[in-house]
Structure formats: structure tokens, C-alpha cells
Image (cartoon, grey):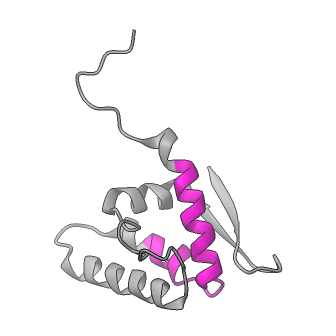
Amino acid sequence: MTYTLQANPTGTRTLAVSDEHLETIQKYDLLNRLIDSTGFIDESVLDKLKLNLRSLIAAQVEDSKDLLDLCIDVIYHNNMKAFGLQQLVRLYQEWLPAHQPQPEGENKA
């Protein structure tokens, strides 16, 4: 599934985010501890995410196509600014509960 995010307050710029992008965010826990206690997302938070991604890609021994796709399609997209990152965080928070892995051994009655 593909989601369209509003990338600026006026709605003139958008970003397309897929389930695969959100799964990559989940797999690498990219948003954990990204935002400080104020909860305010600005350009420095986006820069921190970019640096974290660069470090992850540089340290990868295996294929990092999923990270590269996330970078190219979303994080380093021309329309991605702090407002867009805020929308991405909100989308991820809404998406996550339905996509949490079930613990092994749990039986559904």
C-alpha cells in the first residue's frame, strides 16, 4: 500500500510512502530516540535521521537496498523537510499497531 504525505503546511508538496518504507523504519527502529523530550521536529531532527541512515548504510555488511530505497524515495527526497518528517512520524505511529510482529507461541483462541 502507498500513502501520500503532505510535505508542507500548504499542501502543495507531497511524498509517497509505501508499506516497504514503513517496514524498513520498523526493522531498523529509525524513529526510536530520534525526537527529544520536547517532541518538536525541526530541521536538526531531520539531519540527525540522515546521519543515522548514513552510518547504518556504511556499517552494513549485507545488502542495504531497503535503506537505500528509503533514503532515495523519502528521507532525501527534495520535498522532505521538518514538516514532512513530522507527518511521516504520525503515519508510522498510526501504521505500527497493525503491523507489530506477534510473539511466538501465542495462540489465538
Image quarter where the C terminus lies is top left
Q: Look at 46% across and 71% down and name the residue there.
A: 69
Secondary structure that dominates the magenta span: helix
Q: For the magenta stretch, what is the residue range?
A: 69-95
Q: Look at 55% across and 86% down and name the residue there.
A: 42
Residue 58 vertical position relative to residue 18 in the rendered view, above or below:
below
Q: Does the magenta portion include 17?
A: no
Q: Look at 55% across and 74% down and name the residue there.
A: 74
Q: Does the magenta portion include 74?
A: yes
Closer to us: 15 or 106: 106
Residue 77 vertical position relative to residue 98 in the rendered view, above or below:
below
Quarter occupied by residue 78: bottom right
Q: Where is residue 60 in the image (x, y as percent from the top left)?
A: 21, 73
Q: Look at 44% across and 89% down and name the residue there.
A: 47
Closer to us: 60 or 80: 80
Q: Position of residue 13 (x, y in %)?
A: 76, 79
Q: Is residue 109 found left or right of 83 in the rendered image?
A: left
Quarter occupied by residue 37: bottom left
Closer to us: 18 or 82: 82
Q: Position of residue 102 (x, y in %)?
A: 34, 32
* Residue sitting at the far left: 61
Quarter occupied by residue 88: bottom right
Q: In the rendered picture of this protein, how many numbered marks are placed on residues?
A: 0
